[in-house]
Image (cartoon, rainbow, N blue to C red):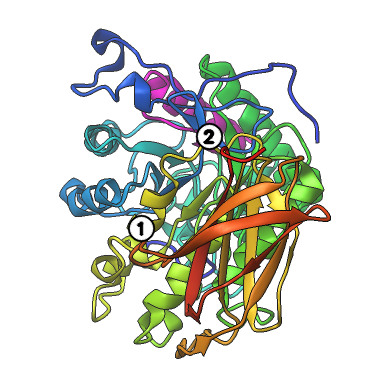
């Protein structure tokens, strides 16, 4: 989660393929509803995307939260109605455990299991976040949200640790936490809609954290999880923002690299779409691993007074949603405040309602596309446009927006006479192009385009705000 957003707020393993999900019989899974096999989510370690029903797919998701199980009902319904598939859930946030260090709070675990069951009925998969920084920060570094004083591992509450940093050292505190971690994975490993395990969210914000100590901690935690999960679901851990710890990201202790783009970063000044494209592509190139957008937004702080509350903020977030599609990330959307955490701040209007179905057009657009072999494609355009493309030798998806359509007002103008050049792979010379309105998915233009010198030169219709291009091999021409 973002700094100031707690509660109130490559080496490849030798296994060639690991299923994220095993559809268990009812007696083994404990589920009343099992997601159909055709919708099962799996993952192969050599691939940058998840698979749905055996086909590589881009997925959308969100970060729901609540302190009562019924608060998840509308959040999960919105996710389902939007065509989203994954939920990243901080299990120590909102509904928090109260049991002594190293033990499972049965009442607390039962509440989460009810949420997981609710998600399964909506066809949604869960990425449980098993630990998060807020409970392991004592406020000495000036962080706004710190809850070490409520952590049952704190010696003042009868726990084993005098400071949060003991979690990252070979201490009794770490030993008990790892035992608890193993118990949680063993308890949930047969649940068919667990998509992956996140060991810890935003390691760098723990009081006293260093790359070296956190790296060793993640290695031990990853080992504990893998021993307990015979299904071989992927493991991830995250840092805040777009921070990088190369020793961690390049090690086989984690399978999925995360980014948490918040566009109040001085370089981007609210351009969340650019931040997503640049951060995802840099990590994909550098670490050769799948990249997961864990959470995102215009600002890491509470919504009041930020771009999240701007009159046309939906335009900017829609840009970010489409930017994720063409970034090379395995997923998109994943808002923080707009996915439910606004409940802790009581903004007006409620962001979770305002942005409830924002990803629906993009999810509808991509749902039947096989993302096998999709890679980033080089794009050239005028300075009037900002965008990116991704694809393979038979299909390309591109998204562009008016380069001046940015916050705080996201002004709209009519751009004419624009042209983009896409360096497409393969030998196909004849292509069909369809241009879509990203809000309505209405086709605003279509035609044919020929490959020239390895590239496709596409003349665009008038651009208002943004457009989406789909280019497919022309089967009628050889």
Closer to the eye: label 2 or 1 = 1
Q: Which residue is identified by label 1?
A: 361
Question: Which of the two labelled residues, at mark 2 and mark 1, occupies the earlier sequence position?
Answer: 2
Say if 51 sits above or below 352 in the image: above
Q: Is residue 277 left or right of residue 282?
A: left
The mark found on residue 320 in the picture is none
Q: Which residue is identified by label 2?
A: 50
Outermost residue, front direction?
477
Please provide percent x and percent y for residue 321. Answer: 47, 62
Which residue occupies 75% across, 59% down?
Answer: 378
For the residue pair 64 and 151, the one nearer the viewer reads as: 64
Magenta residue span = 171-198
Please provide percent x and percent y for residue 430. Answer: 66, 47
Label 1: few (<14), some (14–19) or many (≥20) C-alpha neighbours in 10 Å: some
Asked if residue 436 lies in the magenta stretch, the reply is no
Q: Is residue 426 left or right of residue 131?
A: right
Q: Secondary structure at mark 2?
A: strand
Please provide percent x and percent y for residue 181. Answer: 50, 31
């Amino acid at each position: 989660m973002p700094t100031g957003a707690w509660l109130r707020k490559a080496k490849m393993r030798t296994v060639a393929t690991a299923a994220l999900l095993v559809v268990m019989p009812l007696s083994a899974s404990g589920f009343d509803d099992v997601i159909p096999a055709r919708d099962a989510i799996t993952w192969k370690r050599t691939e940058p995307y998840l698979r749905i029903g055996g086909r590589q797919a881009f997925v959308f998701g969100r970060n729901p939260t609540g302190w009562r199980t019924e608060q998840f009902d509308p959040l999960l319904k919105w996710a389902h109605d939007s065509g989203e598939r994954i939920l990243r859930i901080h299990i120590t946030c909102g509904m928090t455990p109260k049991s002594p260090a190293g033990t499972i709070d049965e009442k607390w675990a039962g509440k989460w299991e009810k949420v997981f069951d609710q998600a399964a009925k909506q066809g949604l998969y869960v990425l449980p976040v098993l630990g998060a920084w807020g409970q392991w920060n004592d406020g000495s570094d000036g962080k706004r949200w710190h809850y070490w004083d409520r952590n049952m591992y704190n010696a003042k509450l009868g726990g084993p640790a005098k400071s949060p940093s003991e979690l990252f050292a070979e201490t009794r505190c770490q030993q008990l936490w790892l035992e608890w971690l193993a118990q949680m994975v063993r308890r949930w490993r047969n649940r068919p809609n667990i998509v992956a395990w996140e060991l810890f969210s935003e390691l760098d914000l723990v009081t006293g954290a260093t790359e070296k100590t956190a790296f060793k901690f993640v290695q031990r935690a990853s080992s504990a999880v893998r021993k307990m999960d015979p299904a071989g679901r992927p493991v991830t851990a995250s840092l805040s923002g777009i921070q990088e710890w190369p020793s961690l990201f390049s090690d086989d202790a984690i399978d999925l690299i995360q980014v948490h783009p918040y566009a109040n970063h001085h370089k981007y000044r609210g351009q969340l779409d650019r931040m997503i494209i640049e951060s995802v592509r840099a990590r994909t190139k550098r670490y050769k691993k799948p990249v997961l957008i864990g959470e995102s937004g215009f600002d890491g702080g509470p919504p009041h007074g930020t771009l999240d509350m701007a009159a046309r903020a939906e335009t900017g977030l829609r840009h970010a949603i489409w930017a994720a599609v063409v970034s090379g990330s395995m997923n998109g959307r994943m808002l923080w405040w707009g996915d439910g955490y606004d409940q802790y701040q009581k903004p007006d209007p409620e962001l979770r309602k305002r942005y409830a179905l924002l990803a629906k057009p993009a999810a509808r657009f991509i749902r039947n596309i096989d993302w096998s072999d999709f890679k980033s494609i080089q794009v050239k355009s005028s300075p009037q446009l900002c965008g990116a493309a991704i694809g393979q030798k038979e299909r390309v998806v591109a998204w562009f927006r008016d380069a001046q359509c940015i916050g705080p007002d996201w002004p709209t103008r009519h751009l004419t006479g624009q042209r983009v050049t896409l360096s497409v792979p393969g030998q196909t010379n004849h292509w069909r192009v369809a241009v879509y309105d990203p809000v309505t998915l209405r086709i605003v233009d279509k035609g044919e385009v020929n490959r020239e010198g390895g590239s496709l030169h596409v003349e665009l219709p008038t651009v208002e705000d943004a457009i989406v291009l789909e280019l497919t091999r022309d089967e009628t021409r050889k």
